[in-house]
Every structure is written in C-alpha cells, then in structure tokens.
Image (cartoon, rainbow, N blue to C red):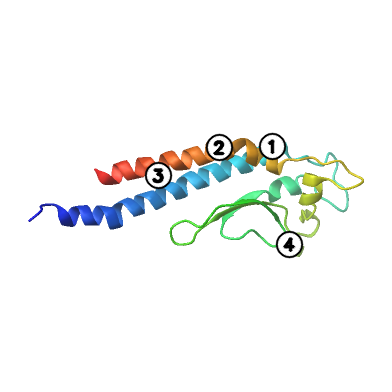
C-alpha cells in the first residue's frame, strides 16, 4: 500500500485550491487598487465647483468592487469569474440620484469626449499601463500558492 495517499489527495483537492483562490483574490484586489489609484490621479478635476457639479465627484466615483459595477457607471475591466464565480469590476461614474450634484454620470463624456469637448482619457490609459503588471502579479501569486500548498 502507498503511504501518504490521503495526505496527497487532501492537498490536491482542498489545500492547494484554497490557497490558489485566496492568493488570486489578494493579487486581484491589489491590482485593482493600483489601477483605481492611477485613474484617480489622471482624471481632470473641476477648478471651481458650479451649481451642477461638485469638484472631485468624478474622481471620487472611481472604484472597484467584487461583482457588478453600480448602475450607470462605465466599466473599465471585469475579470473572468474565479473559483466560485467571483469577479472583480473596475468602474467610474455613478447614476445615483441620492447623490444629487455629486452624481458623476458624465464619466464616459470626459473619457471619450463629445463633438464639442476634447477627450481627457483617464480610465483606459491607466488600465493599459498596469494590465501587464497586474497579470504578472496574479500569475506569480498562483505559482507561489501551488508551491506552498505542495509542501
């Protein structure tokens, strides 16, 4: 009879998958945080607030969440579901009437421009700039979790 078969089976079915899911989740959260921070630093902010908009409302509306983005926001990236169907979504702008003038529904107009206003991209440049780094971090985290789980 082979010794350690139960231990090997437990590692392959429970320990390693759990560690991989947790490492992937942590790496995705860190990457999403970096992309959000860069997008917030690139977004134009109103110099003087007016009665229709609040200075910094668009900047403050940029964020990430597990699952779907808030209603009315534009989505920069949404990962494929991991493990039990969780996915991370990075978004900007909201369509929340409860915010009043802090409602940043105009995110797509700032990002892509209109016929009367030039585009001020902040969202997709940050995503394109950091995408490779984030993917690499996730891959390294998965490999490390597999190595540690196999010990």
Could you tell me if residue 141 is visible in this image?
yes
C-alpha span from label 3 to label 2: 16 Å
Q: CA distance from mark 4 to mark 3?
A: 37 Å
Of pointers 3 and 2, the one earlier in the residue sequence: 2
Mark 2 secondary-structure assignment: helix
Q: Is residue 26 left or right of residue 66?
A: left
The quarter of the picture where the C terminus appears is top left
Tell us which disc is closer to us: 1 or 2.
2
Give the residue at mark 4: 96
Earlier-in-chain disc, 2 versus 4: 4
Tell me the SS state at disc 1.
helix
In this rendering, the answer to whether 24 lies above or below 41 is: below
The mark that comes first in sequence, 4 or 3, is: 4
Q: Position of residue 73 (x, y in %)?
A: 71, 56
Which residue is identified by label 1? Answer: 41
Tell me the residue at 46%/47% (across/down). Answer: 26
């Amino acid at each position: 009879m082979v010794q350690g078969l139960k231990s090997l089976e437990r590692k392959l079915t429970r320990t390693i998958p759990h560690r991989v899911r947790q490492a992937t989740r942590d790496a995705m959260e860190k990457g999403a945080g970096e992309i959000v921070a860069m997008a917030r630093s690139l977004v134009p902010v109103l110099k003087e607030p007016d009665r229709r908009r609040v200075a910094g409302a668009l900047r403050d509306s940029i964020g990430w969440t597990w699952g779907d983005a808030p209603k009315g926001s534009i989505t920069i990236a949404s990962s494929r579901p991991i493990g039990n169907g969780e996915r991370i979504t990075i978004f900007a702008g909201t369509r929340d009437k409860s915010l009043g003038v802090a409602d940043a529904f105009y995110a797509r107009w700032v990002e892509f421009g209109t016929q009367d206003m030039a585009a001020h991209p902040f969202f997709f440049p940050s995503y394109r700039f950091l995408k490779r780094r984030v993917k690499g971090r996730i891959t390294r985290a998965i490999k490390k979790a597999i190595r540690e789980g196999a010990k």
